Image (cartoon, helix red, strand yellow):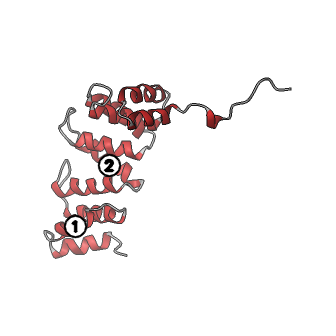
Amino acid sequence: MKPGPVTPDRFKPDPFKEGLAAARRGDYATAAQLWGALAAQGDARAQYNLGFLCANGQGVPQDYAKAVEWYTKAADQGFAPAQFNLGVLLSRDDGVPPDYGAALKWYRKAAAQGDGDAQFNIGVTYAVGQGVRQDYVQAFAWYHRAHKAGHETAAKTRDSIAAEMTPEQLAEAGQRVDFS
């Protein structure tokens, strides 16, 4: 005979979901506490959410360096939203020194997982030459990928940059993208 009742896992409290519920009701301090324990155990979702709270000063003091730290832990595990947000923080001069090369690296990792926002931001990086040589062909190709991934303004941005390109650049860009 087995001792006592068995509680299925589905009835056990889920600290991650409890953190989401706390955040939805605006109790960010509780969310940070719940996710903090999970993040320390290596939960990428909790690490990402803590990074977000740190970046926005919700439930914890605003601390961009801490946000970068938590986003990096989640990004290193392949969590695309963290890779994207890490790229954003590293591409701005907003609380942490910009590192355009690292920002592009993280955007590329998120883009490889189909993140349309990351693909769009890579396009921006090449369009303005942020830490790279300005390259409208690359920008066009990345905007096109972002459009294919469902980014709302990517097609319009791609078409705007096309108006600035030479016929040779347009021909090269056309070879790099699939218009189907």
Dot 1 falls on a residue whose secondary structure is: helix
Residue at image position (37%, 32%) is: 50
Image location of residue 21, percent across then percent down: 44, 36
**Residue kind at label 1, given as amino acid type:** Lys
Image location of residue 46, percent across then percent down: 44, 34
Q: Give the farthest residue toward the front.
A: 25
Badge 2 density bin: few <14, some 14–19, many ≥20, Cα 10 Å: many
Q: Nearer the viewer, mark 2 or mark 1?
A: 1
Image location of residue 136, percent across then percent down: 19, 63
Q: Which residue is mark 1?
A: 156
Q: Which residue is mark 2?
A: 107
Residue 44's place in the image compared with 84, above or below, is above
**Residue kind at label 2, given as amino acid type:** Tyr
Dot 2 falls on a residue whose secondary structure is: helix
Pick the residue in front: 56 or 97.
56
Location of residue 44 by image quarter: top left
Q: Quadrant of the N terminus?
A: top right
The numbered mark, 2 or 1, whose residue comes first in the sequence reads: 2
Residue 6's place in the image compared with 135, above or below, is above
Instruction: Give the number of the disc on residue 130.
Output: none
